[in-house]
Image (cartoon, rainbow, N blue to C red):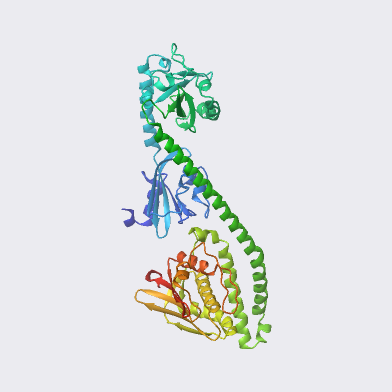
Amino acid sequence: MLKDIPQNVVEYLVDKIPPYTGLLMIKVDSRGIVKNWKGNPEEYLGGTLAVNGSIEEHVPALSGVCPFEQGSVKLTKIQLKDKYCDIHAVKENGHYWIIFIDQTREVDSLKDLLQSMNEEQLKSRGNLNTGADDLPFRHLDKLNFATFLRHDDGAFSLQPNIPKWIAKHPLFEEASGSIDPVEAFPFLEVFILEVETFWNENRESYIVSETWSETFADKDHYLRAYATNFNHHNYLFLKSFIREGVEEQNLLQAFRDSTLAFDKLAKTEKKLKELLAYKNKFNSIISHDLRAPIAAVLGVVNVLTTDEEEIGKLNEDYQELIYGIKDEMNRLLDYNNKLYHWANLELGNFKLELENIALDEIVKIASETAREKCHEKNISLLVEAEKNIKIRVDKTLFLQALNNLLSNAIKFTPMGQTITITAKKDNREVSVSVTDTGVGMDDKMVKNLFKESDTTTTRGTSGEKGTGLGLGIIKKIVDAHKFRITVKSKPGEGTVFTIHIPETNLV
């Protein structure tokens, strides 16, 4: 409908004309970061918005919904400040419009209807202690609930229609049909202290206790307490999960399963803490041991390249070398910054900075970086890269993957052999291959090559040492781009690593 209406008319509708009066629309990115908005945030959120702030700070109901993964999201009857709203998230060109629609009138109508039902059930406040037919919750005994009315002095009275299980409690007084719940069930003393404030606020909601066990009448009872407000009165409900004729084993099994789940959760939490500790340690090492020397070298190179008189004293080869160092140090600094977010890469939340790059340019940079190491081992490096192929990648990370592949190939290729890097378009994809004539691998090694648990390192043909993380980083980078990597290898015949780039990433 609105897509055929001029933009200025739509804006007028949003601001001036019912039913759009007061409508709030907030534009966010996929992570829920605010970009701009239309309407009055104060009316819905009770405060002003800030560009680049998080929408979750203003709308807690959206916590866990961001980042948005679906085309649209709808949340109904969400309370914000003094309003009840329907919240819609609609996708538009990689961003989302969060639309708040005031439904307060509809909710108030429901409240009025409930209030009428309450008044009809209660008759009047003075009839609370008359016949059982005039009482609310009078049929809850059929669901195994015992209902208690809390009085102004803090005492509780057991309401009629008493479930059988509570009548068997030794403190139940049959003559008066009463029992003091706090005396009979000491666990309730703490629970009632927790809900005092809730009761005093008279909010029409409820609070649930943990489950606990009591033994009486030769039976184990598993109990849970509920506290609620109803028409300005406070109620306490007790429910037993064990009744005459009901198998106990099902409930006990459920408790065992619950305990097992908590044990698994505790182990997972412990593992997560270990991973977070590793991440923090790793980030600290990067911060202190790499950032400072990179910045220092980059500072010296910047001084050299900005002093035209001094750089002019060098011949063309040395000038090219200086500018090459500058490019490499900038790239290393950029990669160092990305390593700060390595934990996000592990969790699949890493945000790539995609750009359109000529593939032969990336291959050339990677090959130039590898030539010095190749020269040290008298290895021939051949480059076969097709022209006019452009891909959409994170240049720094993709280049790092190629550098790691070439470094790995040099490590396991004997002196005097050959390494070839090939980039070509084949059918509906582009492939980048690094082929060496090195020691190769058997099928078992190839199968376990990218396993996360395998961080072993093998010395190269000239005794080179490794970190054991190179291939893992390559796999993470390839996965983050949604590319594929394949390996072909035979002992003594060398290895071919190939990165497959789908047609969707071709420009």
Q: Nearer the viewer, residue 295 or 213?
A: 213
Q: Nearer the viewer, residue 166 or 244?
A: 244
The quarter holding residue 466 reads: bottom right
Q: Nearer the viewer, residue 493 or 416?
A: 493
Image x and y of residue 156, in percent:
49, 19
Image x and y of residue 73, in percent:
39, 50
Q: Residue furthest bottom?
A: 315
Q: Nearer the viewer, residue 77 or 140?
A: 140
Left or right placement of residue 400 versus residue 291 in this view: left
The quarter holding residue 333 reads: bottom right
Residue drawn 49% across and 27% down? Answer: 214
Image x and y of residue 236, in percent:
46, 25
Left or right placement of residue 341 versus residue 118 in this view: right
Task: Note whether 455 is above or below 277 in the view shown.
Answer: below
Task: Note whether 373 is above or below 13 in the view shown.
Answer: below
The number of numbered badges drawn on the structure is 0
The quarter holding residue 102 reads: top left
Task: Note whether 60 is above or below 202 in the view shown.
Answer: below
Residue drawn 37% across and 14% down? Answer: 131
